Image (cartoon, rainbow, N blue to C red):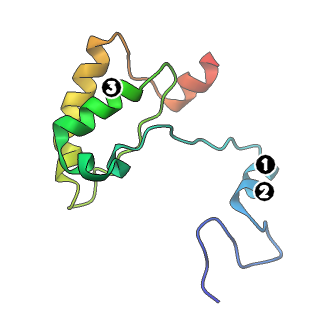
Amino acid sequence: MREMPGVHIDQNRCSHKSECAANSNRTNIMWDIAPETFGEDSEDPQAMATEVLEQVEPGSIVLLHLMYKNREASRAALPLILKGLKDKGYRMVTLSELLAAQ
């Protein structure tokens, strides 16, 4: 049997990652903006940055996979996104800081 994302095969342990997180006093963290899923816009750094800046709100988490070779557009969009966020008055914080502020 092949393991599916988020599901453990070993029935002696947790049956789902969210159950494991709850049982270990961990918090599930999700993102609300995933620019690499914007269709054609995900191939254009400027369009990607524009979409992020239009969708962002206080507490947003932007998901990018910059480490993959085929993510050149994401890497090019990152400086545009960061500058745009700073220009809008946002600042980057760690997850710990974000959770503490809520």
The disc placed on residue 19 is 2
Q: Mark 3 or 2 closer to N-term? A: 2
User: Callout 1: 10 Å neighbours few (<14), some, many (20+)?
Assistant: few
Q: Give left or right: position of 16 versus 87.
A: right
Disc 1 to disc 3, C-alpha distance: 33 Å
Residues at circles 1 and 3 in contact by the CB criterion of under 8 Å: no
In this view of the protein, which residue sits in the foreground, 59 or 13? Answer: 59
Q: Give left or right: position of 52 versus 47.
A: right
* Residue depicted at x 35% and y 25%: 54
- Where does the image place residue 39, in percent across and percent down from the top left? 31, 52
- Where does the image place residue 14, in percent across and percent down from the top left? 78, 66
- Type of the residue with mark 2: Glu
Q: Which residue is mark 3?
A: 53
Q: Please, is residue 19 above or below residue 81 in the view? A: below
As helix, strand or loop, the secondary structure at mark 1 comes to helix
* Residue depicted at x 28% and y 55%: 67
- Type of the residue with mark 3: Leu
Q: Please, is residue 22 above or below residue 54 in the view? A: below
Q: Quadrant of residue 93?
A: top left
Q: Give left or right: position of 50 versus 32.
A: left
The disc placed on residue 22 is 1
Q: Mark 1 or 3 closer to N-term? A: 1
As helix, strand or loop, the secondary structure at mark 2 comes to helix
Image quarter where the C terminus lies is top right
The disc placed on residue 99 is none
Q: Please, is residue 83 above or below residue 13 in the view? A: above
- Where does the image place residue 85, in percent across and percent down from the top left? 31, 20
As helix, strand or loop, the secondary structure at mark 3 comes to helix
* Residue depicted at x 44% and y 38%: 33
Residues at circles 1 and 2 in contact by the CB criterion of under 8 Å: yes
In this view of the protein, which residue sits in the foreground, 88 or 55? Answer: 55
